Image (cartoon, grey):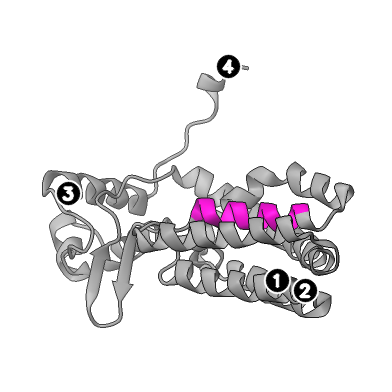
């Protein structure tokens, strides 16, 4: 059957609020760091309940577009509220826990192996990835490419073709989890510090320490706003 003739889905009220907020940010030419009107004011202007406004704000927080500060209002994280469709967000939330479980199992072992098997050249490649990530963050970025390079370098240093193949098979899902984690407030610098701890354990040739450092890191990656969000019907 044609995709165009799939069943119609009734738009939820908070989804309409999301679209209105996106339009408001664009029309008002708001930028990162600017504050949105208070929830009560938004509800009054839009003619909806505060609950609908709150749910819309949560959706935009989950996407890393807004930041609510306790007692201090809601602020833009970026210059736009344009984000992925809600359906994609819901699907990613469903698969993320399994991806994170796989990452912990695979990458903890790879870090352990890297501490035992890495060459001097491979250790240097891990260090270069750290430096690249540090420069990205210093320049105002999230450090996504540096993070990718770091984990790829650790995987290569583990010298396990089978584990490397498993990592390659879920590369797309790993990219999703990486991006989801690094856009959490304060996460890039914390991730860099944990990468440094992993590097130091690998450099010291201490497999157990490297595995523990990687496990701690991946469990931090798992602490994302998306997994605390419960989509409403």
Q: Residue at x 57, y 57 (%)?
A: 129
Label 4: element kind: loop
Any magenta on residue 151?
Answer: yes
Query: Where does label 4 land, which residue?
Result: 2
Q: Earlier in the sequence, mark 1 or mark 3?
A: 3
Residue 124 image-quadrant placement: bottom right
Residue 116 image-quadrant placement: bottom right
Q: Are marks 2 and 1 in contact (CB under 8 Å)?
A: yes
Quick one: quadrant of the N terminus? top right
Label drawn at residue 211: 2
Label 2: element kind: helix
- The location of residue 130, given as percent across then percent down, is 55, 62
Query: Where does label 3 land, which residue?
Result: 24
Q: Are marks 1 and 3 in contact (CB under 8 Å)?
A: no
Can residue 177 be seen by looking at this rendering? no
Task: Report whether 218 appears left or right of 17.
Answer: right
- Whole-angstrom CA distance, mark 1 to mark 4, is 46 Å
Q: Residue at x 77, y 57 (%)?
A: 157
Q: Residue at x 50, y 56 (%)?
A: 132
- Whole-angstrom CA distance, mark 1 to mark 3, is 42 Å
Q: Residue furthest bottom?
A: 71
């Amino acid at each position: 059957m044609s995709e165009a003739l799939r069943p119609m889905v009734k738009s939820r009220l908070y989804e309409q609020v999301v679209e209105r907020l996106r339009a408001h940010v664009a029309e008002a030419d708001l930028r990162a760091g600017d504050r949105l009107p208070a929830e009560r004011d938004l509800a009054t202007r839009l003619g909806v309940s505060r609950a609908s406004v709150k749910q819309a704000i949560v959706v935009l927080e989950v996407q890393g577009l807004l930041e609510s500060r306790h007692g201090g209002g809601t602020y833009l994280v970026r210059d736009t509220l344009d984000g992925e469709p809600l359906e994609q967000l819901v699907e990613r939330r469903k698969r993320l826990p399994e991806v994170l479980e796989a990452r912990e199992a695979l990458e903890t072992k790879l870090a352990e192996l890297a501490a035992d098997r890495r060459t001097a050249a491979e250790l240097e490649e891990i260090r270069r990835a750290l430096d690249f990530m540090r420069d990205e963050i210093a320049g105002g970025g999230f450090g996504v490419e540096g993070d990718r390079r770091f984990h790829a370098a650790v995987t290569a240093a583990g010298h396990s073709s089978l584990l490397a193949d498993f990592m390659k098979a879920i590369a797309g899902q790993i990219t999703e989890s990486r991006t989801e984690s690094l856009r959490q407030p304060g996460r890039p610098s914390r991730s860099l510090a944990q990468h440094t701890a992993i590097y130091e354990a690998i450099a010291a040739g201490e497999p157990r320490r490297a595995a523990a450092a990687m496990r701690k890191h991946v469990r931090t990656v798992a602490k994302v706003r998306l997994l605390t969000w419960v989509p409403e019907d």
